[in-house]
Amino acid sequence: MQNGKLRQWKKDFGFIEIANGERYFVHISTLKRGGIHQPRIGDTIFFTVGKDKQGRSRAQMAASSAEQLAKNQARREAKSAEVKAARFDWVDYLAMGLLPITLLLVLLSPLRWVLLALFVVMSAASFALYALDKKQATRGAWRIPEAVLHFIATLGGWPGAWAAQQVYRHKTQKGIFRVMFCLSMLINLVGLGELMISSVAHWF
């Protein structure tokens, strides 16, 4: 654990200077997670040191007091242990159940090749966006809007989105996001069913 003064601040990032003059980059998202919503130059900040993707030192967790930082660390460790203990939740089991149903509907559709191509492209796009969002979250940088992730999932990218959630362990704990992801899967399935019914009716 380190502590220092916020010596430089530009809108959503700045630098914390410790006693020996060394400075550490800190992003606004890191401060907000620690309860610091309106940082000011001169504020004393307690923080833990981590590395960004380029190997540069940065503030990984931060708080306005040593006690608060210790609580945040304990909460994060408990949450991590909980995630490891319960890898799948009800949304994951629903996704696993919907995958074969979706595949069956696609294969039975007269437009099977078009739908297969759509699912492959959208799933690849979803996977790539989740990977990018995970990278951005780690760096404390700009994030992919959740509405974009849900929109692509609804268009047929939900298998890729679900795969990315498991691979990167990303977006697996936020309750409202999981509910919206569930709705995306169901809306996509309903749309696929409607397409199947209209296609069959066309032939009769």
Image (tube, rainbow, N blue to C red):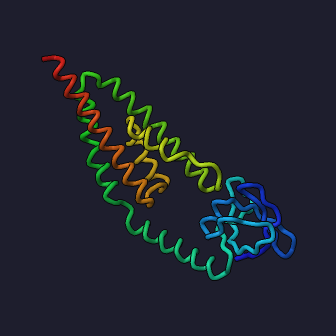
Residue at 39% x, 29% y is 118
Image quadrant where one finds the C terminus = top left
Residue 187 location (% of width, % of height) = 31, 40
Q: Nearer the viewer, residue 2 or 146?
A: 146
Residue at 16% x, 17% y is 203
Task: Find the residue positioned furthest to the right.
Answer: 21
Q: Is residue 65 left or right of residue 176?
A: right
Task: Find the residue positioned furthest to the bottom.
Answer: 67
Residue 62 location (% of width, % of height) = 66, 70
Residue at 28% x, 39% y is 189
Classify residue 92 by image quadrant.
bottom left
Q: Is residue 13 above or below residue 118?
A: below
Q: Nearer the viewer, residue 190 or 20?
A: 190
Residue at 23% x, 35% y is 104
Q: Is residue 92 left or right of residue 40?
A: left
Q: Is residue 191 left or right of residue 181?
A: left
Residue 145 location (% of width, % of height) = 53, 46
Classify residue 40 by image quadrant.
bottom right
Q: Is residue 33 left or right of residue 193?
A: right
